[in-house]
Amino acid sequence: MYVAKTKKSCHLAVLSVMVLALMHASLVQCQLAGKLVQNPCSGKDKCHTCIQTQSCAWCMQPNFEGRSRCFQHTSPDVCPEQFVWNPDTSEQILINKNLTLAGESQAYGSAGGFGGGGAAGGGGQYISGGSSYHQSSSSSSSSSSASSYGSQYSGWSASSGEIVQIKPQSVNLKLRINQVHNLKVSYTQAEGYPVDLYYLMDLSKSMEDDKEKLSALGDKLSETMKSITSNFRLGFGSFVDKVLMPYVSTIPKKLEHPCDNCKAPYGYRNHMPLNNNTESFSNEVKDAAVSGNLDAPEGGFDAIMQAIACRQQVGWREQARRLLVFSTDAGFHYAGDGKLGGVIAPNDGECHLDLQGMYTHSVIQDYPSISQINQKVKENAINIIFAVTNSQYTVYEKLAAHVQGSSAAILSNDSSNVVDLVQKEYNKISSSVEMKDNATGDVKITYFSSCLTNGPEIQTSKCDNLTVGKQVSFTAQIQVLKCPEDPRDWNQVIQIYPVGINESMVIKLEMLCSCPCEHPGSIGYEEHSPHCNNYGTYMCGICDCGEHHFGNTCECSVSDMNSTINNDASCRADNTTNVDCSGRGNCVCGFCECFKRPNPEEVITGKFCECENFSCERNKNQLCSGPDHGTCDCGRCVCKPGWTGSSCACQASNDTCIPPGGGELCSGHGTCECGVCKCTANDQGRYSGRHCEKCPTCSGRCQELKDCVQCQMYHTGVLKNVDDCARNCTAFTPVGVEKVTIDEHKDEQMCTFFDEDDCKFMFKYSEQGELVVHAQEEKECPPKVFMLGIVLGVIAAIVLVGLAILLLWKLLTTIHDRREFARFEKESMNAKWNAGENPIYKQATSTFKNPMYAGK
Ligand SMILES: *[C@@H]1O[C@H](CO)[C@@H](O)[C@H](O)[C@H]1NC(C)=O
Ligand SMILES: *[C@@H]1O[C@H](CO)[C@@H](O)[C@H](O)[C@H]1NC(C)=O
Ligand SMILES: *[C@@H]1O[C@H](CO)[C@@H](O)[C@H](O)[C@H]1NC(C)=O
Ligand SMILES: *[C@@H]1O[C@H](CO)[C@@H](O)[C@H](O)[C@H]1NC(C)=O
Ligand SMILES: *[C@@H]1O[C@H](CO)[C@@H](O)[C@H](O)[C@H]1NC(C)=O
Ligand SMILES: *[C@@H]1O[C@H](CO)[C@@H](O)[C@H](O)[C@H]1NC(C)=O
Ligand SMILES: *[C@@H]1O[C@H](CO)[C@@H](O)[C@H](O)[C@H]1NC(C)=O
Ligand SMILES: *[C@@H]1O[C@H](CO)[C@@H](O)[C@H](O)[C@H]1NC(C)=O
Ligand SMILES: *[C@@H]1O[C@H](CO)[C@@H](O)[C@H](O)[C@H]1NC(C)=O
Ligand SMILES: *[C@@H]1O[C@H](CO)[C@@H](O)[C@H](O)[C@H]1NC(C)=O
Ligand SMILES: *[C@@H]1O[C@H](CO)[C@@H](O)[C@H](O)[C@H]1NC(C)=O
């Protein structure tokens, strides 16, 4: 690990920043490798914590001084191979029986005993060293339980034993923490796989017609199923409800005959255990009497629980697809409803049937809960088909979502479609396979499969549209997330199984959480070892010193030390970390012994090994730009005189920034950084050039020179006072020219201004060494205009026109008056004056009377 490589030293630098964040916050900047990756192995000082870290290996070489024993196994030559403990994930297939191909199972059906066949089938596949776990346990338990079923069924149970639908069957797996292991699981649907179908029927009064129909269809049902698999068994049970108020009427007369042609109510009854004598099914159904109850929901959950729990009485076979058809037209009671009838004892999930197949604990125990049902269904790999009437479908559909492997379907209200329904649901169930497992939280299993397509595998645990003989493969990705606290949990048995099939792949998983060298009896394990000053236990190459001693060889004693000094704490910069010596040294009696590096040029120093002299900033791959420029001290370059910068790459003197002709640093338009001008920008433009001497878009010195040109050339402007002009304008004397023109090659600047008289004046300047100004001799002024004349003229014109109009008006009215007067004179001479009243005269006042006014 400690190779002189920049990337490795980067890891250490990052670690040290983390460790000493408070003291050396800006200590090391690591941009060299681009990636900031911490070495996960450093700081792991015990073998088991080391191998619980991914890609780390432990070195148990004695005398492995000065280096971390936990190292990345990819680093070469850290530790001699015989001392490395780096357990690897391993897989060992213990039982790998071939899948039963189409047609094979029938042949086995008549072949007889399971035990013998199983041994023969599995025989060739054992891998040496593997135990025969699966074989022995399955064969013994199956034969014992098979015999307890009673002679009538034992033949079937035995014959079906040889069908193999999942492969491999047993695997030994050793897994490192966080390592992902892929395991291939194959599944096929065998032809003629045994099917057990138990018909569980609600026999309340409303189901009477259904019962008749079912009894009529019984033969058809069994024929249809036998066409699917010859190995078919049928059973029948019925239920009503708990015989208690308020579920059923407890009036004595009603108890006997709750309704016309009704029998007494009951909880659940197993009428016909599963058997191959399917002809008797119809009779059993016909003979079962209907009963009556009060409330709408029925006690179906009690019946489901008994039908599943009573494996023996109902006669479920071990190797068979188990279907439970639950047919009803009403809702269901569930856990807690029992309180209405005063039943408070919770359901215990056990079988309680008497010899007649009657449920004995109906009024003693409450209904089971949905999760109890689900649990039982899972344990027993049963597929429930809820065949319910249309009105109840939505309820049971939701229920089916909570019970593994179950489904809901609509039953016509007289059960006439029951055969179709069962066949359809069976096909649905058998044509899909879903993988499940019982792994606990510390182990994660994810499934991938391409199912029947040829495409890439996608994450799924379910494949659809399987037919008999088609084989699908799943890849189970197994990962141990962390070591469980309890060492007993480091070995686990995990089952991977297809839902609804009582076959599984058993994984015996060993989590690689500990090192064998840590256990008594292994090589090198020695209590009170002389390696450890007779105080500690020598294991895995290190000393485990117990409570009273510490140090690499237990050479430090707690009593020697100041009691206030805690060994661990004295090797850590502060309490924000729990890594001793910044992970780059060993804590020895409270002091850090920093690791040595293979390259003697590289040393780790500091009280907490927080410093080193090989991870400073680099320039051109030279630490601190090479030994001539600076040296590396605790992650920071210390520059030699004449050099500056974070990597000592910069010259300290500013000489290179001064223009060749002399003058200001960077022509006054920039700063000198690292021997190079950094030019400034202003609102007119950006200076450029090696010494910031150029600025094509800047206005230059025009504004500055303007006033002096103006006063010296034209004696105008702010400095037109002769004294001011002489005093302020000493830098140059403008040379008068007739016309100012710019010579492109001479780096001349043209300036144009307008003065207060609106006259344009132009001048140019050049700064080749000395400032030379050429100015136009004459200003260009706009021609003068006599404004007053224009104004007076306009006013006079307006007055004259007004007078003329007045005169004209006066003339016209005079003429008019004269004429009128002449006419009047003439008329007055002709007419005699009439002294009467003027006929057109009207008095100024008029009087009106309100007719409605009473006049009070
Ligand atoms: C399993 O199948 C393979 C090839 O299909 C065959 O070579 C092998 O003999 C079979 N093993 C058993 C035990 O039948
Ligand atoms: C039912 O099983 C018995 C053996 O348990 C067998 O003798 C009988 O032939 C089977 N009946 C049918 C119809 O398959
Ligand atoms: C599943 O089969 C095994 C034998 O292969 C048997 O021991 C076990 O009881 C069966 N499980 C169920 C739920 O039938
Ligand atoms: C059966 O359903 C039909 C409609 O789907 C309905 O008219 C009839 O009454 C139902 N019969 C019973 C017995 O519920
Ligand atoms: C299964 O087959 C049906 C009809 O053949 C098709 O519609 C459906 O998409 C298939 N499902 C999958 C998952 O391939
Ligand atoms: C998984 O199931 C198997 C068989 O039932 C059992 O032996 C094992 O302990 C279970 N594993 C876990 C983690 O529960
Ligand atoms: C114990 O502590 C004292 C002062 O606190 C110090 O001078 C002395 O060196 C310490 N001894 C050891 C063994 O660290
Ligand atoms: C660390 O030490 C400081 C004072 O020295 C204390 O306030 C703080 O609680 C400590 N933190 C932890 C995590 O122990
Ligand atoms: C690191 O320090 C050691 C000892 O002080 C010195 O010999 C070595 O040259 C230094 N290395 C560098 C790269 O400065
Ligand atoms: C060089 O110039 C920079 C700014 O441009 C200034 O900060 C620095 O002090 C100068 N160095 C010397 C040696 O004059
Ligand atoms: C001219 O120079 C004097 C002092 O030398 C200064 O006070 C005055 O502001 C200057 N005038 C202009 C217009 O720059």
Image (tube, rainbow, N blue to C red):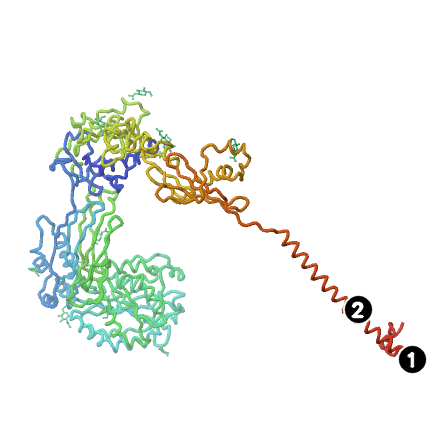
Q: Amino acid at mark 2?
A: Thr
Of residues 91 and 192, the one drawn nearer to the viewer in this rendering? 91
Q: Is the shortest distance between ligand 11 and the CB of mark 2 under 8 Å?
A: no
Residue that label 2 marks: 814
Residue at 74% in and 64% down:
806
Which image quadrant is residue 824 in?
bottom right
Of residues 302 and 50, the one drawn nearer to the viewer in this rendering? 50
Crowding at dot 1, Cα within 10 Å, few <14 / some 14-19 / many 20+, comes out as few
Crowding at dot 2, Cα within 10 Å, few <14 / some 14-19 / many 20+, comes out as few
Q: Earlier in the sequence, mark 2 or mark 1?
A: 2
User: In this figure, what is the number of numbered marks?
Assistant: 2
Image vertical order of residue 775 relative to residue 843, above or below = above
Spot occupied by residue 334 in the image (x, y as percentages of width and height): 35, 62
Of residues 512 and 814, the one drawn nearer to the viewer in this rendering? 814
Q: Quadrant of the N terminus?
A: top left
Per the image, label 1 sits on a secondary structure element best described as loop
Per the image, label 2 sits on a secondary structure element best described as helix
Residue that label 1 marks: 832
Q: Quadrant of ligand 7?
A: top left
Residue at 77% in and 67% down:
811
Which image quadrant is residue 211 in?
bottom left
Of residues 310 and 634, the one drawn nearer to the viewer in this rendering? 634
Q: Amino acid at mark 1?
A: Lys
Q: CA distance from mark 2 to mark 1?
A: 28 Å
